[in-house]
Image (spheres, rainbow, N blue to C red):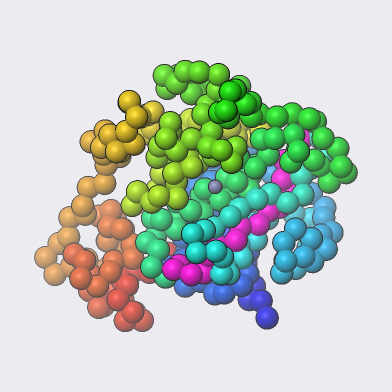
Amino acid sequence: MLSWALLGHAGAAGFGIETRLLGRPLTAAQQATVRDAAARVSALITSPFVPVRVDIAANDCDRGLPRVQGTLKKLLVFVVVKRLKDDVYATGMPCDLRDGSYLPVYGVIDLNSDGLSDLPREDLLDTMIHELLHVLGVGTLWEADYRVSVSGDTDGRTLVRRVGGALYYTGPRALAAYRTLGGQGPGVPLDPDAGHWSGRAVCAEILSGDAGDFTGRVNPVSVLTLGALEDLGYRVNRAGAGRFSLPKGSSCAAQLKGEASGDRARTPPVVPPGGFASCAAARAAGATLPIRRGQPGYRTQLDGDRDGLACESG
Ligand SMILES: [Zn+2]
């Protein structure tokens, strides 16, 4: 009753993430987006995924997951596409944690099948990167209660501190990054769920509580989130940090406006007369793929299945 597809093989030399799809089928383009997200997240991590032997019973972490036996050489992430509550796009969490390092062995992402077909590629990519970070432990392994290994050990470490009525992240690496960005106070402000940067204080960042308010782009994975990965025990590629600045004053809109004038601002692709010769040409020109019917550069010749989306796969 469940469809099963082996999807991603990302980051062969470094940290690998393997995504396996379950549940309702995704289109080829959506599958490519899931793979892309896994590749982007694994490229942020330079420490290897240490192979681990597992024998995980079916339904062990989430209903509907199959039994897994053998040696995992990459972080295994089940992506279960199913109906979730209306206002939830997706959820992500680690399952078993290793003894000693408390790093995840595998995890699961539930992706809401409702409205998925209307979700633009950038927003699905943003969602998947966000949830994969949760699977790695960012925002999900910050409190001692959750830092329990397969053997039942815990290091008792908590990275969240309550000051007055507010929650702050106090892991040293992310906190240092926050300071270099000009942030002040006892820690990085968190949302009340203790699992996301405060939407108001941090605004558009991949792990901000406001990440669900799509900005029509992939929110940056900033030095804050890379620092949070380091605090968990991963080594990271700091050069991979996305351009990010804390909002000045209290306006998230002003932050977005400021960044849009920077060098990562999206410039429209130059479409040659008569459209792109090929999907490779469209990609090289920086066109956002797939190209929808009615958008500049769309040609039926590039839309093999005539569904109004040109250059869907790849
Ligand atoms: Zn989240």
Q: Tell me what residue is drawn at x 82 percent, y 55 percent.
A: 54
Instruction: Return the residue nearer the eye: 94 or 158.
Output: 158
Q: In this view, does 310 lie above or below 126?
A: below
**111 magenta-colored:** yes
Q: Tell me what residue is drawn at x 86 percent, y 37 percent.
A: 153
Q: In this view, does 13 lie above or below 107?
A: above
Q: Farthest residue in the front direction?
A: 165
The residues colored magenta run 101-116
Q: Is residue 48 above or below residue 67?
A: above
Q: Can residue 263 be seen in this view?
A: no
Q: Is residue 179 above or below residue 149?
A: above
Instruction: Return the residue nearer the eye: 89 or 85.
Output: 85
Report x, y in % for residue 173: 58, 24
Look at the image and tell me in which quarter the N terminus lies. Answer: bottom right
Q: Can residue 287 be seen in this view?
A: yes
In the shown orientation, is residue 124 left or right of residue 249?
right
Q: Tell me what residue is drawn at x 24 percent, y 72 percent.
A: 293
In the shown orientation, is residue 145 left or right of residue 307?
right
Report x, y in % for residue 171: 62, 25
